[in-house]
Amino acid sequence: MRNKNFFTFLVLFMSLSLLLIGCSNNTSTNNNETDKSKEGSDASQEVVKKEGKDITIAVADNFISMDPHDTNDTLSYSAQKTMLEGLVGFDKEMNVIPVLAEEYTANEDATEFTFKLREGIVFHDGEPFNAEAVKANVDRLADPANNLKRHSLFAIVKETQVVDDYTVKVVLSEPFGAMINNFAHPAAMMLSPKALETYGKDVSQHPVGTGQYVFEDWKPGDHLKVKKNESYWNGAPNADSITFKPTPENGARVAMLQTGEADFIYPVPSEQASSINGKDGVMVENSPSIIVRYMAMNTLKKPFDDKRVRQAINYAVNKEAFVKVVMNGYSSVLDSIIAPNTQFYSKQTPYEFNLEKAKELLKEAGYENGFEATVWGSNNSSSIKGMEFMQQQLAQIGIKLEVVPMEAGTMSEKIWSVENPEDAELELYYGGWSPSTGDADWGIRPLLGGKDAFPPKSYNTAYYNSEEANNLIAEALSTADPDKRKASYEKVQKLLWDEAPWTFLSVDDTMAGKKNYLEGIYLLPDGSLSIENLEIKQK
């Protein structure tokens, strides 16, 4: 079966809901304010002048790693994607498209995926991109001994076969119809085998790929810079260089865009979106995402081991107020474990804001007078605002929250590096998740899929483990039949909603700001950055 037919058969059912997302708007829009789209349109301001072709992008947090196989944050992937590429990838509607592979096929059982590679491509270090290079990367991901953060996406790989120099076959241990989406995930981007051999684990500081830009230098906390790949296989990019500047403080990030110190920023703080859009050559773009925002509760610790306490917290938080106060209307209330535009989403009945119900449940659980707890989260302005909102809301039912913001390195050590669940100090975690495969599997299994998903293996910060939920997740993974997968995911979403291992908050909008001389740069629905078609309009 040729690539086009296979894609149509296998991915069409994955894409139907994602197609509803649409492209980023060229104006700032707000789901709760119908006239926002008229503010600051591009027609109302002239294109401002850009000197040179060096681009600066200000982001909210520090990068953690430049090794795609060992990365657990979407932000780091955004920088990696300027330098690295996968066999396939996503377009702006999250449809799977060929990249380093010009076509791909699958057998009827969805246990064998064969990729025909583009010829004549070389890594930045001069090494050839071929079937052996693909095998080196896939085998690295599939080997549990490597302890890579993205191993779970490829744990199902049984064998990688080199058919010829430019054909590679990946054999799975069992059917998995959504596997092509796993290959499109940034985790499957290709690193030079020579770099893997030379640097070992230190390849995270020395990325060598096939992409539009070549790694230049990285000073954590200050900047990461890439420069134009003049010999890029699909034509040299438009920009000479791209410099990423971590800027956690919202006001500073916005000021950089307004003054021209930055050409593109994300996220734009929702409270400032309307005020900056259409001024100083700034355009704000927002669109529905597949990013869910939640507060995980460590179900191994008291009092969060009691479902009544977890449900009480859900009843005590006004989700509509969260959308308005914390997100300034640039989000929607979360009504399942996954966002509506994720494949196999099943809507649940939201927990209404009901303080009396919350107090009643706490009393039943033996916490009539409340309790004290600590919530951890990132140290950027938006996360702090969200945690402080939770602090205020839960105070209404006697729960006293201590807010502890953390920078990325500290969070990695305190949350993601804990080997023994009993050693985890985490009580509550305020964060978000983007299922970057666009599939329900990656929106549920890494976060709530039992002991196999506990840190450091994966991202189950609720330390939630339910045999029933685990069986339903396994059932959904055991077939390529979309109807059977849908039925299993409907059941597990209903179960998890009732179990409430999270406080369910919202679905983010993607929020980015740019100077109006930039085109072809945008955020995908998973929140990652796309620069493949970046153009600089110059007078």
Image (cartoon, grey):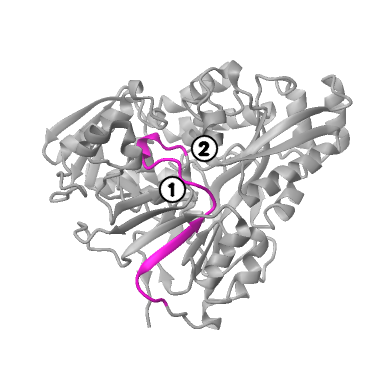
Could you tell me which residue is drawn at 87 percent across and 23 percent down? 363
Q: Amino acid at mark 1?
A: Ser
Quadrant where the N terminus sits is top left
Residue 391 visible, this orientation? yes
Looking at this view, is 443 or 238 the one in front? 238
Q: Residue 65 in magenta? A: yes
Q: Which residue is mark 1?
A: 15
Q: Residue 70 occupies which quadrant of the picture?
A: top left
Q: Which region of the structure is painted magenta? A: 50-72
Say whether disc 2 or disc 1 marks the residue closer to the N-terminus: 1
Secondary structure under badge 1?
helix
Disc 2 and disc 1 in contact, CB within 8 angstroms: no
- Residue 87: give its label: none
Could you tell me which residue is drawn at 53 percent across and 40 percent down? 408
Predominant SS along the magenta part: loop
Q: How far across and down, in percent of the image, does residue 301 sit?
A: 68, 20
Q: CA distance from mark 2 to mark 1?
A: 36 Å
Q: Which residue is mark 2?
A: 409
The residue sitting at the left extreme is: 164
